[in-house]
Amino acid sequence: MKNNFELDKPHDECGIYAVYSNHNSELARTLYFGLYALQHRGQDSCGIAVTNGLNISYYKNLGLVSEVFSEEAISALPEGDIAIGHVRYASSGLKNSINAQPVVYNGRLGMFAIAMNGKITNAEVLRKRLIEEGMTFQTNIDCEVIANLINKHTDNGKCDVERAMRELEGSFAIALMTSTELYAIRDRYGLRPLVLGRTEDGYYLSSESCGLDATGVELIRDINPGEVAVISAKGVSSSYFAKATRRPCIFEYVYTARADSFIDNKSVYEARYECGRTLARKLMLKADIVAGVPDSANVSARGYAVESGIPYIDVLEKNRYVGRTFIQPNQFMRENSVKIKLNPHLHNIKDKEIILIDDSIVRGTTSKKILETLKKAGAKAVHMVIASPIVKHPCYTGIDIETYDQLIGATRNAEEIGKLIGADSLHFMDVRDLIKCCSSGDYKTFCAGCFDGDYPDDIEKKLKDRREI
Ligand code: SF4
């Protein structure tokens, strides 16, 4: 089960990492380190599939990358030319090893493997239709719907990938591997990130650039919204399955992505730092110290401290070894679950007026416990500053906040939320300021649907029309 702390943060669906290599004799090991760097995107299961040009071998299971891939499991994967890997957070579809990815499929295209990050919002419609057409399913995950579509749109061993992609609604970043080619595909809005990198021995894909950094790969560019990039012995060729309207998920910058990643040409660290500075300029709060809720809010807190001139001092120490899952805690431990993860620095807190920065508030349960902890430790006052706007709406495209009743901010303003969580004052960021902080060059449009209700592709309306929400 997820612990209280983790339930109070939105989670992405997954991370993908893939390699097309000419000479990498340690393909599976490279995948291991790439996935290890993407572990924050999913901790429920993981898998690696490798092809040597004839067959596809794979191994996947429940657990963290370091748990699933022992030295033995890595060594058992054969040498090969192309490989794809995946880490999964099971927000939809059951958490079992069958639902782990990559999905390996044997059909009209021969054997292929596919892994995705995102959420197909018309998956159930497609699944029903494909079953009526005679296709079979082993899992209840969206990725197998895509695998069946790939199979359906294959004729004489040639797949019309663009046509298959046009059938999909929602968000997706996909790595698809045949025995000779590696495909990189991003939905028409670019909702989920996917980057392309290169070394002398081949091409690499990663959900975030931190996966490339961990494996010594140079970042070349982002896969574009609506792009189907095919990597083969001839190099990289691209086509587009739809007219692209760039609107990537702004929550990647707020919380989901690692601060050392670049997404669509923008440093996540820089975006968060700018958020902190902007808030300091706008709010002009007075206090003794500025602190961040570790780890994701620390960068914004540093930005706030530098801009305001108020010293940055840590008030909470994070236990780095608490994963996203605990054994079932008893009542006593449940009440102390935040303290297991975040312990107060008593000497930094006593009699201090604190500006506490967090990245977001979703359900509010963790914020309430953190504020109780700081007050109990002797804080004179805690002004909570959130480096994003109020989450007022669900996300239907992959982050696990799917209903209004999960959100403390759905029907409340900042003052009401502040009272409920016990803050002396509570402040949020304006959505236009957030967009400004995350923009770079020509990249100035985002999905900010969970903040402003404006979703790409009328997703909410389509789901309501189909009575799926
Ligand atoms: S609704 Fe929010 S979390 Fe979902 S894709 Fe849009 S910005 Fe991201």
Image (spheres, grey):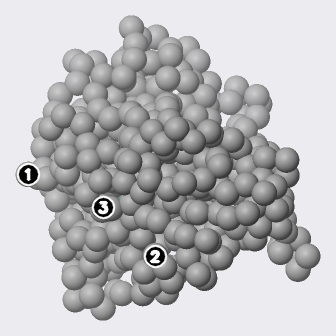
Q: Which mark is residue 414?
A: 2
Q: Position of residue 457 (x, y in %)?
A: 18, 68
Question: Which residue: 61% across, 71% down?
Answer: 424
Which residue was labeled with disc 3?
431
Decide which of 273, 422 is in the foreground and name it: 422
Mark pair 1, 3: CA separation: 26 Å
Look at 36% across and 22% down and name the residue there.
219
> Label 1 crowding class (10 Å Cα cut-off): few <14, some 14-19, many 20+?
few
Label 2 or label 3, whichever lies nearer to me, is: 2
Q: Position of residue 107 (x, y in %)?
A: 36, 52
Q: Quadrant of the C terminus?
A: bottom left
The earlier-in-sequence mark between 1 and 2 is 1
What element does badge 1 sit on?
A: loop
Eye-nearest disc, 1 or 3? 3
Amino acid type at mark 1: Lys
Cβ atoms under marks 1 and 3 closer than 8 Å = no
The residue wearing badge 1 is 243
Work out whether 138 lies above or below 57: below
Q: Amino acid at mark 3?
A: Val
Along the viewing direction, whichever of 335 and 85 lies nearer the viewer = 335
Q: Please tell me whether mark 3 sits on a helix, a strand or a loop.
A: helix
Is the residue indicated by label 1 positioned so its CB lies within 8 Å of ligand 1?
Answer: no
Q: Earlier in the sequence, mark 2 or mark 3?
A: 2
**Considering only vertical position in the picture, is 219 above or below 337?**
above
- What label does residue 91 carry, if any? none
